[in-house]
Image (tube, rainbow, N blue to C red):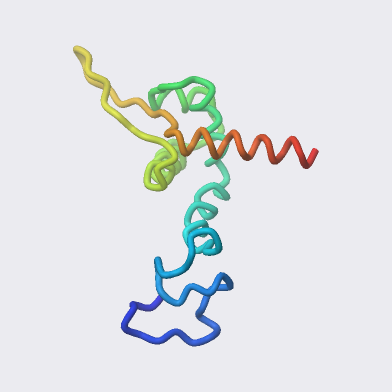
Amino acid sequence: MPDSSQKLTPSEIPSCGCAEPGAANASTCYCGVDDLMRIIRRRYSLVVMNAIHGRGRVRYHDIAAVLPSISSSTLSETLRALEATHLLERRQEAAERPYMVYFLTSSGVTLLNRLRQLLGEIA
């Protein structure tokens, strides 16, 4: 979207009517959903989220072991994207030898639960 000092042409205004970011009613504006949809449409995003959800707090190699078809670079990229959208968190565990763990945020859990409910209603 152009910066707020520029006027938008009719073709640039999203279908929800937002002419300025943050200016529309949150109940009718779906602009923020685009980034989220881009992430969860990725091939492995939901699979990775599901693998983490079923195990709680997990280390990288635990996720990789459950999903052997995912390359290391794809898994890393997927984890970073999910973290950037606040669907999961990465945190260092304090121990003699610190290590990183991944876990779903409350938003990530809510999203998975709602998607499961939706799929159940469709099936």
At which x and y percent is residue 3? 34, 77
User: In the rendered view, does 35 fall on the left or right side of 84?
Assistant: right
Toward the top, the furthest residue is 96
Depicted 18 relative to depicted 6: above or below: above
Which corner quadrant holds the C terminus? Answer: top right
Depicted 5 relative to depicted 88: above or below: below
At which x and y percent is residue 56? 45, 21
Q: Nearer the viewer, residue 13 or 77?
A: 13
Q: Nearer the viewer, residue 59 or 68?
A: 59
- Name which residue lies at 55% across and 48% down: 42
Q: Quadrant of residue 14?
A: bottom right
- Name which residue lies at 47% across and 26% down: 63
At which x and y percent is residue 15? 58, 73
User: In the rendered view, does 97 fall on the left or right side of 20?
Assistant: left
Toward the left, the furthest residue is 96
Depicted 37 relative to depicted 16: above or below: above
- Name which residue lies at 21% across and 16% down: 97
